[in-house]
Amino acid sequence: MNPQTTPKVALITGITGQDGSYLAEFLLEKGYTVHGIKRRASSFNTARVDHIYQDPHVDNARFKLHYGDLSDSSNLTRIIQETQPDEIYNLGAQSHVAVSFESPEYTADVDGMGTLRMLEAIRILGLEKKTRFYQASTSELYGLVQETPQRETTPFYPRSPYAVAKLYAYWICVNYREAYGMYACNGILFNHESPRRGETFVTRKITRGMANISQGLESCLYMGNIDALRDWGHANDLAQAKQHALLKANGYVVNVSVE
Ligand SMILES: C[C@H]1O[C@H](OP(=O)(O)OP(=O)(O)OC[C@H]2O[C@@H](n3cnc4c(=O)[nH]c(N)nc43)[C@H](O)[C@@H]2O)[C@@H](O)[C@@H](O)C1=O
């Protein structure tokens, strides 16, 4: 086959999440073959990607889901070996800041060590020169902000187990780039929302609460810190930013926000 017509192959961790689902749509539209890693659950957990699901028995299926977990290195290594991705987007995470205080060790394992496991798998399989790696870094790294606005050079000051785990992931990505010459980049994304946002995050908590109150199902909505300020990007726009960062940022770090 003419190499120019061979579709690029992407592997996405966290494909069943808000960001993974938008990125999968975006890459499929661009002609990629998209593989995603989903965790096993006894109830259905693929609602955000069901509309793009293709039965693997169909000829030329370009979308495939694999069971896996960021805490399982042999599983990750096997999936990367089987799929031979040109691009990996590491979006899988225990993504909830408040929950990270209740499950700090799990958060460190999945968000921090999980990133190391992916990078090690690429290295062990000898794919350093083929596979580009995008790490979902986060504005939570800035935590107690040291300057406003924040830039790529602003010092980090993480303020939650989630942010500390993501700090490890950020630096191990930098380290693998410098130590092994891998193409690994960090996209520092600020807050982003969509109708696919998880229902325990504040936007969906408010919209669900309002809907329930209007239906007479609840009488009151309890909020946490109502003085917090956040950027408000759309997750679909940021899907494009991720691919742009991976292809154009030459392996470095980019801040992405709408403000
Ligand atoms: C802020 C947040 O922003 C983005 O995430 P999102 O799309 O907005 O958040 P979400 O909760 O909708 O998706 C998280 C996904 O992740 C999966 N997930 C968890 N644990 C493992 C796990 O252990 N293995 C795999 N394969 N997937 C996992 C989990 O099943 C789900 O599909 C990322 O940058 C994210 O990195 C981030 O931190």
Image (cartoon, grey):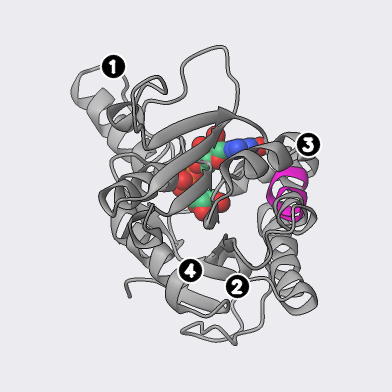
Q: On residue 246, which mark appears?
A: 4
Instruction: Report how far apart the C-alphas of labels 2 and 3 lie in the structure.
Output: 33 Å
Type of amino acid under label 1:
Leu
* In contact (CB < 8 Å): disc 2 and disc 3: no
Query: Does residue 241 appear to the left or right of 155 in the view shown?
Result: left
Q: On residue 28, which mark appears?
A: none
* In contact (CB < 8 Å): disc 4 and disc 2: no
| Image x and y of residue 41, in percent | 58, 18
SS state under label 1: loop
User: Mark 1 sits on what residue?
Assistant: 217
Write down the region rendered in magenta: 109-116
Instruction: Report how far apart the C-alphas of labels 3 and 4 lie in the structure.
Output: 25 Å
Between residue 77 and residue 99, name the one nearer to us: 77
Query: Does residue 193 appear to the left or right of 98 in the view shown?
Result: left
Instruction: Report how far apart the C-alphas of labels 4 and 2 lie in the structure.
Output: 22 Å
Q: Earlier in the sequence, mark 3 or mark 4?
A: 3
User: Mark 3 sits on what residue?
Assistant: 74
Q: Quadrant of residue 210?
A: top left
Q: State the residue at coordinates (71%, 76%).
A: 181
| Image x and y of residue 8, in percent | 42, 54
| Image x and y of residue 147, in percent | 55, 86
* Residue 18 showing in the rendered view: yes
Between residue 167 and residue 34, name the one nearer to us: 34
Q: State the residue at coordinates (74%, 53%).
A: 112
* In contact (CB < 8 Å): disc 1 and disc 3: no
Q: Earlier in the sequence, mark 4 or mark 2?
A: 2
Query: Does residue 39 appear to the left or right of 148 in the view shown?
Result: right
User: Mark 2 sits on what residue?
Assistant: 142
